[in-house]
């Protein structure tokens, strides 16, 4: 469906993928034969509208959506209201997670391109977001450089060890948080400020524990990418649909690089090998977005319970795969 509007918004918010539940990842919910959760959509949609759409109201944000949950099409339309200018909801495809996510992302972005043709001028930027991504603070879209591909600064699995790596951490992602002389940090225990904090130029060799063989090189094109959100021109986002068409080649190339078929690696491969746009990649820190299954309980109760039954914690490390969108 497509809804027409006379407003001249600068930005497009693209929602994509499979809707899971508050506790389960989308793929896990699918294989457990669980229907997509309307509760999850109520939870995340409120954050999308507050911290992306209304936070950028002066420039204007139009919403476009694709999902693998046709049963939730009415819920999506109700929640996003007049901000939703285009949506498509297809039956789920049982394919590799990265392949289906890329296909959904491409189909949602095609709605943006159709809207551009109808209104006669382009959007300045497309901000693509997973359905289960919760936004915890305003996202200033004007800060993201137009014409570039911006991804989140992502955490790796090993510590920053050498002085140069520690300097990279402090310079790119620890500014204002840690004192380089005393080691004291506002958000982390003393002496632990470098643990799991190698952000920005984050390579899959490091993620795969193969960093001894390949040193950290900022010029390494095969960076590990966070797949919770990405910002780029609409045509670039739409090109992700080609990943599904080229899936045999993608798998073959990943095997050559000894990488798993995860979106974290498939996206950089697409940007570098297919689009040849690695020079346009930028990293953005401080975008407070986290996956709902990791933050829901903290928001509901004000804490995170230990999975082993321990006490409630009001802090969580920004280590591998963790984010802190609510600022505890």
Image (cartoon, rainbow, N blue to C red):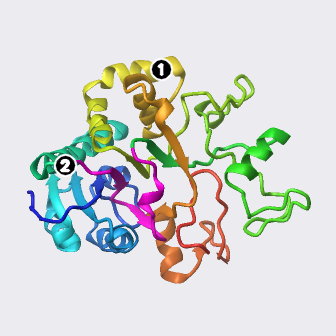
- Asked if residue 144 lies in the magenta stretch, the reply is yes
Q: Which contiguous range is marked in magenta?
A: 122-146
Q: Residue at x 77, y 52 (%)?
A: 194
Q: Does residue 79 appear in the picture of this structure?
A: yes
The residue wearing badge 1 is 255
Q: Position of residue 312 (x, y in %)?
A: 64, 77
For the residue pair 267 and 109, the one nearer the viewer reads as 109
Q: Residue 10 placed where, x, y %?
A: 29, 58
Which is more foreground, mark 2 or mark 1? 2
Whether residue 307 sits left or right of residue 114 in the image: it is: right
Horizontally, residue 289 falls left or right of residue 115, namely right
Q: Is residue 51 above or below residue 209?
A: below
Task: Residue at 52%, 28% (x, y): give it.
Answer: 259
Give whichever of 192, 153 is nearer the camera. Answer: 153
How many angstroms separate mark 2 from mark 1 (CA)?
41 Å
Image: 255 above or below 305: above
Q: Are marks 2 and 1 in contact (CB under 8 Å)?
A: no
294 left or right, relative to 155: left
Give me the disc on residue 121.
2
Q: Residue at x 48, y 47 (%)?
A: 151
Q: Quadrant of the N terminus?
A: bottom left
Q: Earlier in the sequence, mark 2 or mark 1?
A: 2
Where disc 1 sits, the SS reads helix
On the image, the x and y values in percent for residue 23 come to: 42, 65
Q: In the image, is residue 35 above or below residue 103?
A: below
| Number of residue marks | 2
Tell me the SS state at disc 2.
loop
- As for residue 291 lying within the magenta part, the answer is no
Residue sitting farthest toward the right:
182
| Residue 75 visible in rendering | no
């Amino acid at each position: 469906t497509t809804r027409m509007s006379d407003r001249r918004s600068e930005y497009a918010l693209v929602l994509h993928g499979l809707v899971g539940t508050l506790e389960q990842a989308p793929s896990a919910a699918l294989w457990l034969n669980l229907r997509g959760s309307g509760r999850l959509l109520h939870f995340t949609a409120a954050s999308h509208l507050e911290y992306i759409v209304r936070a950028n109201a002066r420039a204007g944000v139009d919403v476009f959506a694709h999902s693998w949950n046709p049963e939730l099409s009415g819920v999506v339309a109700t929640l996003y209201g007049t901000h939703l200018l285009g949506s498509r909801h297809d039956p789920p495809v049982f394919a590799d997670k990265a392949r289906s996510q890329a296909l959904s992302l491409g189909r949602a972005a095609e709605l943006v391109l159709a809207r551009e043709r109808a209104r006669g001028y382009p959007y300045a930027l497309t901000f693509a977001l997973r359905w289960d991504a919760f936004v915890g603070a305003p996202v200033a879209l004007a800060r993201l450089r137009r014409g570039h591909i911006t991804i989140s600064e992502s955490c790796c699995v090993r510590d920053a060890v050498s002085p140069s790596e520690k300097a990279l951490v402090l310079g790119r992602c620890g500014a204002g948080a840690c004192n380089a002389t005393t080691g004291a940090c506002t958000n982390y225990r003393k002496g632990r400020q470098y643990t799991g904090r190698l952000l920005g130029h984050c390579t899959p060799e490091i993620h795969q524990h193969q960093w001894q063989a390949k040193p950290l090189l900022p010029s390494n094109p095969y960076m590990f990418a966070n797949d919770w959100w990405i910002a780029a021109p609409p045509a670039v986002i739409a090109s992700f649909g080609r990943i599904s068409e080229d899936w045999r080649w993608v798998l073959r190339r990943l095997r050559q690089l000894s990488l798993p078929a995860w979106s974290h690696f498939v996206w950089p491969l697409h940007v570098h090998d297919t689009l040849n746009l690695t020079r346009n990649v930028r990293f953005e820190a401080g975008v407070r977005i986290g996956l709902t299954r990791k933050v829901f309980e903290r928001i509901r109760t004000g804490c995170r319970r230990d999975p082993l039954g321990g006490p409630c914690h009001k802090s969580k490390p920004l280590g591998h795969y963790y984010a802190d969108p609510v600022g505890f």
